[in-house]
Amino acid sequence: MFAYYDPDADIAWLPTGDSDDVVSERVPDGLHDYDRATHQLVAIEVWSASTRLPASILEALPTPDTECQ
């Protein structure tokens, strides 16, 4: 589980928990992922992240390719 920022897609993914069975809910400007059984929030996906999150946060996040290596 790791947070990342994909500058090509301009999407930030920020985990808040862990789950093997996730259901996603579309919200304005992104997705919220919930554990199916407990309904706890386990991740937030922010679309157009460069316009919604501070640049300092996005610069600190790895890209998906960097983290997966």
Image: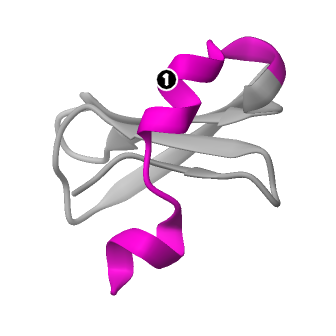
Q: Write down the residue under mark 1.
A: 57
Q: Is residue 45 visible?
A: yes
Main secondary-structure element of the magenta-colored stretch:
helix
State left or right for residue 7 relative to residue 23: right
Residue 50 is drawn in which quadrant?
A: top right
Indicate whether 7 appears above or below 49. Answer: below
In the image, residue 53 lies in the stretch drawn in magenta:
yes
Indicate whether 26 appears above or below 67. Answer: above
- Percent from the top left, x then y, of residue 32? 52, 32
Disc 1 crowd rating (10 Å Cα; few below 14, some 14-19, many 20+) is few
- Percent from the top left, x then y, of residue 30? 71, 32
Q: Is residue 33 visible?
A: no
Indicate whether 18 appears above or below 12. Answer: below
Looking at the rendered image, the quarter that the N terminus falls into is bottom left
Residue 49 is drawn in which quadrant?
A: top right
Check disc 1 and report its element: helix, strand or loop: helix
Residue that appears at 62% across and 12% down? 54
Residue that appears at 28% across and 53% down? 2
Residue 46 is drawn in which quadrant?
A: top right
What range of the chain is rendered magenta?
51-69
- Percent from the top left, x then y, of residue 19? 19, 54
Residue that appears at 21% across and 65% down? 20
State left or right for residue 7 relative to residue 64: right
State left or right for residue 21 relative to residue 29: left
In the image, residue 68 lies in the stretch drawn in magenta:
yes
